[in-house]
Image (spheres, helix red, strand yellow):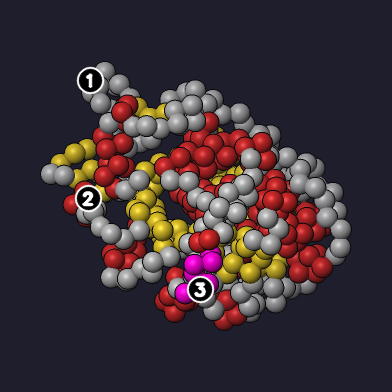
Amino acid sequence: MGGGLSAFAVAERNADAAPDASARSGGLSASLFAAAQAGPQRTALRDSGDRAAWCGRPPITWTYAAAAEIVGRLARGIGAWRLPAGSRVGLWFSGGAESALAHLAVEAAGHLPCPMPALWDAGQLSAGIASAGLVAVLTEGRRGARRPAEDLARAAMGHFGLRFLAAFGPGVPDGVISLDAMALERGVVAPAASRGLVTFAAGDPGRPVYRSAAALAAAIDVHLDAVPVTADERILTLLPAHDLRGLVTGLGAALAAGGSLETVIPFDEAGFRAALMRPVPTRLVVPSLIEGALAALPLPWTVRALHVVHRAPARTILASFPESAGPRRLDSLVFDEDAVLTRLGGRDLAATLAHPERAPLPRALLDLAFLDLGDDPDGPLAYRGLACATALLPRAGIPEPDTQAWRNSGYQPTRSGGIEAA
């Protein structure tokens, strides 16, 4: 009990621990380094569950100081590869702290992080490498029964432009650089200004999508506008950070606030229950797929907010959101790799979808409206603004999305019997 009370008591002391807007505009790695200056001994990243059985490595808790040191070392090692600035570097991880460190290191080295879904098979991996024009890929030696570093080494034989392969953990084959060894090399570099990132629309390896650092920062700010994360909070997430959904609600939100991120990947019930019981103020982030199962699980008093993330198209049943004495409820609707719309509860989300013109949104960053298609004045939902500024990645160069152009979401909210359906 004493530990739980002391965790809440540090909220006031950590009030100034979040990186300011100028640091966040430099990218996720800049936010990490700024937060490490403000509160070096606070927890930044933590793994949960039986990581030893999953990847042959124990779960590790990283303070901001330690995480910044390792990111700086890895960035220095990646810099020694002498890749042109802004090179496209793949990240093929199942999730966890090492995935976050790799993402931050690639960004800090001045390159474009390109996270890829862990569930891709060999064909999808090869297609993603080709479509994104990857020149390097970072991964892990073990992933359950799979051996990603070995899979990657085989895939590299078909891609002449793929010059560097690197991996964390045991089981790193010949020809693949050990990121563990790289992290032991002393010497760090200051983070380069972020050049953005690349994700894959609908997890399709043939559809890489570019987003600038400013656009990612705007998406995170719009998300946090609903209920900001505080520096004393932990984000406990079941979402991997290989897409906009996971990055905005997890790593991005935690670094923006100077808080901590704990991942339960892969999911196991015992590890999840143990993580829930840690006496720290918690924002629990879960996919809507497990919402029903979660309803049967009593949440401890330390869970300040339950954050349910939906992918469009999704049905939001208003009757399923009764008032309760439990944690605050947040709901996010994610439009592929374009936008994340977060509201305080399902009712607010449904109302925003039904009447976007009335919603109190930060419209300088994300504006919503219905497209007027002539025969239907209430056409599909559209959005514009920096927070949703994306473009398909060309084979060479970096696109410049138009932030003021309205973009069709492809979905039309409808109302029927108390149900909002997108």
Label 2: which secondary element: strand
Query: Where does label 2 land, which residue?
Result: 317
Q: How crowded is mark 2: few (under 14 residues within 10 Å), some or many (20 or more)?
A: some
Is 2 covered by the magenta stretch?
Answer: yes
Give the residue type that dot 3 points to.
Answer: Gly
Q: Kindly report the distance in space between the C-alpha atoms of the residues bearing marks 1 and 3.
A: 64 Å
Picture coordinates of residue 106 (x, y %)? 71, 51
**Span highlighted in magenta in the image:** 1-7
Picture coordinates of residue 234 (x, y %)? 52, 60
Nearer the camera: disc 3 or disc 2: 3
Q: Residue at x 63, y 78 (%)?
A: 58
Query: Does residue 198 lie above or below 214 as drawn?
Result: below
Residue 242 shows up from this direction: no
In the picture, which quadrant includes the C terminus?
Answer: top left
Nearer the camera: disc 2 or disc 1: 2
Q: Residues within 10 Å of mark 1 (few under 14, many from 20)?
A: few
Query: Does residue 241 lie above or below 50 as drawn?
Result: above
Give the residue type that dot 2 points to.
Answer: Ile
Picture coordinates of residue 239 (x, y %)? 48, 59
Q: Which residue is drawn at 57% across and 81% down?
A: 53
Is 39 covered by the magenta stretch?
Answer: no
In the figure, residue 226 lies in which quadrant?
A: top left
Q: Are marks 2 and 1 in contact (CB under 8 Å)?
A: no
Label 1: which secondary element: loop
Q: Residue at x 40, y 32 (%)?
A: 361
Picture coordinates of residue 308 (x, y %)? 37, 55
Query: Does residue 203 lie above or below 362 as drawn?
Result: below
Q: What is the number of the mark on residue 375? A: 1
Tell which circle, 2 or 1, labels the residue nearer the N-terminal end: 2
Query: Where does label 3 land, which residue?
Result: 2
- Look at the magenta stretch and give its main secondary structure: helix
